[in-house]
Image (cartoon, rainbow, N blue to C red):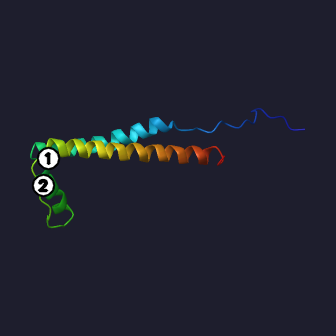
Amino acid sequence: MAIRAIPVTRAEPQLLGVNRAGLAFALLLGGFHLVWALLVAARMAQPLIDFVFWLHFIRPAFVIEEFDPFRAAGLVLFTSAVGYLTGAAFALLWNRVRSGGT
C-alpha cells in the first residue's frame, strides 16, 4: 500500500473575465491609436513614419495628412471598440476551452 504525502486534487480552471479582457484590449488598441493621433497633432508622425520605412529599406510613399480632431476621435473610438470585441471574443474562447468545451 502506497502512502501519498501530497493529496491529488484538480485545480479549478482559470477563467478570464469577458468584460475585463475586452477593456484591456480596448485600452491597448485605443491607447496606441491615441498616441498616433497625438503624434499627428504634434507634426511628428511624418518624420517618424519616414524613419521607420527607411529602417526597413522602403521608400516612403505615404503622406500624413493634417490633424483633424474629429477623425482622431473616430480613430480612437473605432479601434477601442474593435479592441473590446477582440478581447471579449478571446476571453469567451479561452473560457470555453479551459472549461472543457461545455
Q: Residue at x 45, y 35 (%)?
A: 20
* Residue at the spot of label 1: 40
Residue 29 is situated, as x and y percent measured from the top left of the image, at 32, 45
Residue at 13% x, 45% y is 68
Say which of 7 and 50 sits in front.
50
**Alpha-carbon distance for marks 1 and 2?**
7 Å
Q: In the rendered view, does 59 fall on the left or right side of 94? A: left
Mark 1 packing: few (<14 Cα in 10 Å), some, or many (20+)? some
Secondary-structure class at tag 2: loop
Type of the residue with mark 2: Ile
Q: Quadrant of the N terminus?
A: top right
Q: Position of residue 3 (x, y in %)?
A: 84, 34
Q: Are marks 1 and 2 in contact (CB under 8 Å)?
A: yes
Per the image, the residue denoted by label 2 is: 64
* Residue 79 position within the rendered picture, expressed as x and y whole percent measured from the top left: 31, 46
Bin the neighbour count of mark 2 within 10 Å (Cα to Cα): few under 14, some 14-19, many 20 and up. Answer: few
Q: Closest to the observer: 3 or 74? A: 74
